[in-house]
Image: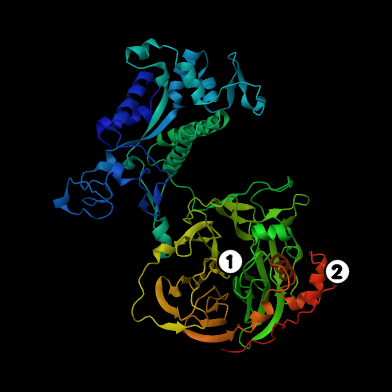
Amino acid sequence: MPAPPDLRALLDAFFRPGPETLPVQLLRAAAELRARSSGALTDAAMLDFGRPVDGGAWCPRLFGPTEPLRCRCGRLVGPERRGQTCERCHVLCTDEPLREQRVAHIEAPFGLVHPVLAARIGALLGLSRSQVLAVADGETVILPDGRLVLTQDVDLDDEQVSFETGPRALRRRLADLVDPELTAAGLSAEALVLTSVPVPPPGDRPLHHEAWPDEDRWFRALWSQRVGSDNRALQGLVARALRAVRMLELDAPELLLDRDCIAAQRAFEAALDLLARPADAPERAPGPLDGWLPAPLHGDDEDHVPGTPYPFRLAGAPAVSDAYERDIYHRAPLRPDVPRACVLAEGDRALVQLGYAMLLVHWPTGHVLKNIPATEARLLGAAGAWALFGDKFGRQLDLADPTVLRGLYALDLNSGTWLEGPYPEDLPAIFVEKDQPEDAWLTDWRGQRGATGAEDGSGDRADEWARSPDHRYIWMSSAPDDGAVLDTERGVAVLMISHMCERAGADVPTLALTGPDPDEDAEIDDQVGRAVAIARAGGEWRILLPGGQLRRDGRVVLRFTEAAIECAAFDPGGERLLLVNRDALHVVDVAGHQLLARLDLRPLAPALALPEVLPPELADLVLARWGTLAAALAQPDEALLDLGLDAEQLAALRAERPPALPDMLSET
């Protein structure tokens, strides 16, 4: 249903003014829309995976219920509740088409310049229309003598240079001027710079529906209703305006405040451009469902074109931090035998990353094939004969040689050596990168592209929790029981973990594990790996959730009991599941719910223990370098002294007789 005629006329006067529209007419329309507003938008988000965000541009409290005769929370339902407002969600229960009739507004006390009003502003200030818009957009600045200068020609860091720019500068200069026509209408010249922007009814900016017949139900739940470019532009304006208002409240420095106000002005112009078009205009529709964007140039590699394959090299084995960095960034494990991560690799091999050592085990027989010092980098997964690791703080190109990518490491599981040289083309190079703790995004270093994470649903302070064995799907979240699974081919979310909420039936089979109970010690919990795993096999999602629930396409098919799971991983085919805790290694047949192997890890603890004859920081350095005390004692004295040991400490260490790691793990 279209907006009522009187509302339609007001909206057209503001968003689609004709060449004959007078400033007074536009200002009166803006004032009338402000008077009709149901409230100000307080959140830039619009939908949280199909659910309207309170205070956003789809909010049922502001614009009316999304379902007839039903409030948002469902407390008020039916004709007998008509006309009542829910005390819980504050949504009116009605069957009136309010979402075609109600408007809201965006507060902009810093001021925004409507392009139609730019000519009148220019006439009052002695500027042309284009000059007014250039100042509003921050492209030019006004000097104290009234001259206009391009912003790029001004040294913004020079405190001796005085200038004004942005819509705030125009509003200040209009404050003392008088416009007879506006005065006759009861308006001031300062009113030419708007302090609020109307938000049209949702019926004027509908969602776009797509069937996605070739996708599964989880994907359709996410993307059957999509927000168009018009609403995206509106969200951008809300975000910029809210930030500018906050900067005003904080009394931020003028330079920073003007920057945010200018960003809001540009977002305002972009939103006006889209909302002025017909509702069915292609420009207002959503763009292609592809989250990947070309990444900017990195380092000094000016010849590389973003979005094209990037050939890079690895620098070999990861370095061990010094004592200071380990104390700050890599806290020593309280229990060296607690697993941090694990993978199931080809050839029936399991790689388990412990506190200081990594074990490559042939799980059907229990043979320990290799014992390798663990790295500070986290084990991410396997690909063929390689195990991939990523630094805690992401990856970056070497400043001296931008063909070298640091922070990514590849271990050859056959030889036990670290890759130094060109990165194989068949290996994935997609990782979760972080700048600030609250920001996370996908980066494809091979294709030099990034997914912004705006639609990944991964929550605040997101990180990687798990990835599928083929590295196509990555579970990003700020908590292990929520977040989103992203498709790295598209760079978009394809599954929300919270959508898999079907309760486990009483007849769900259980499988008892061996090992400790879940640890209540927060410090140990910080050390253990992430006891979740994902795989997609034959079009079916297979997910291990916290608490030991194994789900297949949403249905709980198996529960693991009796012991904690401290890290987990599927095999490349998604047919087997590796479950590890400090006491045992388990391999489970996913389809048959059978335990294929249960290896005893308890004999590892004595060989992994920290040497008690050294101070904790030195003991940590010794094991961080060589994995076990037995391996450290095989090193020459010079290597140990270089770590900071004195002669007395070296002698005490040499007197130790630590056990070696076993060559075989027995069944338990």
Q: Give the image location of residue 471, x and y in percent.
A: 58, 66
From this view, report whether residue 567 is shown above or below residue 315. below
Residue 542 appears in the figure? no
- What residue did someone put label 2 on? 638
Q: Which mark sits nearer the N-terminus, 1 or 2?
A: 1
- Residue type beneath disc 2: Glu
- Residue type beneath disc 1: His
Q: Give the image location of residue 2, x and y in percent.
A: 28, 39
Q: Which mark is residue 471?
A: 1
Q: Secondary structure at mark 1?
A: loop
- Rounded to the nearest angstrom, the CA distance separating label 1 from label 2 is 42 Å
Callouts 1 and 2 close, C-beta under 8 Å: no
Q: Give the image location of residue 489, x and y in percent.
A: 56, 60
Q: Secondary structure at mark 2?
A: helix
Front residue (pair 106, 627): 627
Which residue occupies 40% across, 75% down? 556
Q: Check the picture and name the quadrant holding the C terminus.
A: bottom right
From this view, report whether residue 481 is shown above or below residue 659. above
Where residue 348 sits, quadrant-wise, is: bottom right
Front residue (pair 117, 45): 45
Front residue (pair 161, 527): 527
Q: Check the picture and name the quadrant holding the N terminus.
A: top left
Where residue 180 sits, quadrant-wise, is: top left
* Residue lying at the far top of the rendered structure: 180
